[in-house]
Image (spheres, rainbow, N blue to C red):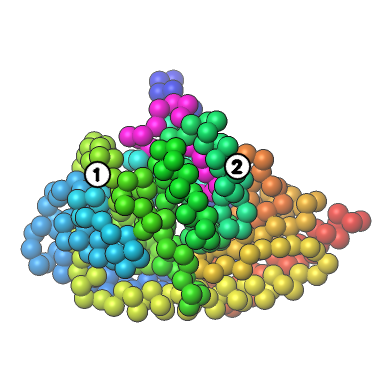
Amino acid sequence: MKYGFSQRVRYLKSSAVRDILKVVNKGDVISFAGGLPDEGLFPVEAVSQAFQKAITSDNKALQYGETEGVLELRERLVERMARKGIRRHPDNVLVTSGSQQAIDLFSRVMFNPGDVILTENPTYLAALQVFESYETRVVAVDSDDEGMIEEDLEKKIASLKPKCIYVVPTYSNPGGKVWSLDRRKKLLKLAKKYHVVIFEDDPYGDLQFDKEAAPPPIASLDNNEIVLYTSTFSKTVVPAMRIGWIVGPHQIIRIMAQAKQATDLHTNSVSQHALVHLLNDFDLDGHIQLIRNTYLERMHVMKDLLDKVKGTDLSYITPKGGMFFWVNMPSYVNTTELLSTAVDQGVAFVPGSPFYVSNPEENTMRLNFTNSTPELIQIGMERLVNVIEQSQYETVR
Ligand SMILES: Cc1ncc(COP(=O)(O)O)c(C=O)c1O
């Protein structure tokens, strides 16, 4: 049978990361590939009590709910965002099924085929998947360790007239980088000058290692005019609850809520009510501190082993938070080719090239340090270091 799919299907791509995960989640492979939090840290008891309470306290949690999200949850989100300097009204918040849905709904209401979106290079793969599915043109802006470079950004805004600038400025995925305050301000200034919306994706902001926190979110520097800000409980509570949110100018949020209505009516009510109970009854901030300490220790274990690679000139930024190392190998290494040898040796990573919008650097890789215990990181990294050193030997030979 020949099925008559829509034209749009041509632009749907499978995620390279998910494809790799299917291969590596077998046997004795230690995987640094996924972007997963550690299930060992899930607050199982608190989540279970919160769901129990949601289901038994009244029947609202089992009923259809408002598309915008449970009001009490939006109020709690407003309080939490205010602590980061993002001062908004609950009416400007839309609760979504993870921040992934926020990216999708935003794209659905904003982009026509051919519209230009500016991003960093590399950037979050699943956002690229969404943008491409709406037949947009994604263009990379030159960046360095501090964020997008102003000159290139202004040149591209002026010549390409983008609809939106998508950024992950705090402990980015995949780059593990933090934008400086100066670059955040410059981005905002240019976006205002040329009337371009900024989409700030911040799933990792709470996972900071440094006592000195990252600069404030870009949304906190804006008066709800031009920045849409999305975040999630996937990295701090559990991803399976699928609770994220987006806050931004009311006109955009209102239209996104209409699009959400057509998509799934509302985000899972049980999860939303459970989250309200969790936020009321559980010390989430204390729990986040535990996650930070655990991930910081793991980051150091991985860093020490990365530093042990001999004779290979690799470089990386030491993450100040988040979940990833982004490693630049010498230019002769092709990490996609290296992956199959690595998997044969019992360790996996994600090659960097799928994260690029253009001009992929084939010698890059992303390593996740949050989903393995220090003991497994030790064993996995020893395997990886061997694979890297062996590849160098083979190239030289
Ligand atoms: C940069 C970024 N944005 C959005 C998401 C989506 O998160 P969720 O849909 O679980 O909230 C992720 C998940 O890894 C991410 O890394």
Label 1 packing within 10 angstroms: few (<14), some (14-19), many (20+): some
Q: Determine whether, in the image, residue 380 is placed left or right of residue 90.
A: right
Instruction: Indicate whether residue 152 is drawn in magenta.
Output: no
Secondary structure of the residue carrying tag 1 is: helix
Q: Does residue 339 appear in the picture of this structure?
A: no
Camera-side residue of 115 and 225: 225
Label 2 packing within 10 angstroms: few (<14), some (14-19), many (20+): some
The answer for how far apart the CA atoms under marks 1 and 2 are is 30 Å
Camera-side residue of 182 and 214: 182
Residue 44 x %, y %: 32, 73
Label annotation for residue 273: none
Which residue is painted at 41% across and 79% down in the image? Answer: 290
Which residues are drawn in magenta?
107-124
Cβ at disc 1 under 8 Å from ligand 1: no
Q: Which residue is mark 2?
A: 152
Q: Is residue 230 above or below residue 357?
A: below
Q: Does residue 162 appear in the picture of this structure?
A: yes
Q: Determine whether, in the image, residue 346 is placed left or right of residue 159.
A: right
Which corner quadrant holds the N terminus? top left
Residue 7 x %, y %: 44, 23
Q: Which residue is mark 1?
A: 250
Earlier in the chain: of badge 1 and badge 2, it is 2
Q: Is residue 41 above or below residue 116?
A: below
Q: How many marks?
A: 2
Q: Is residue 134 above or below residue 226?
A: above
Quadrant in the rendering for residue 316: bottom right
Kind of residue indicated by mark 1 = His
Secondary structure of the residue carrying tag 2 is: helix
Quadrant in the rendering for residue 307: bottom right
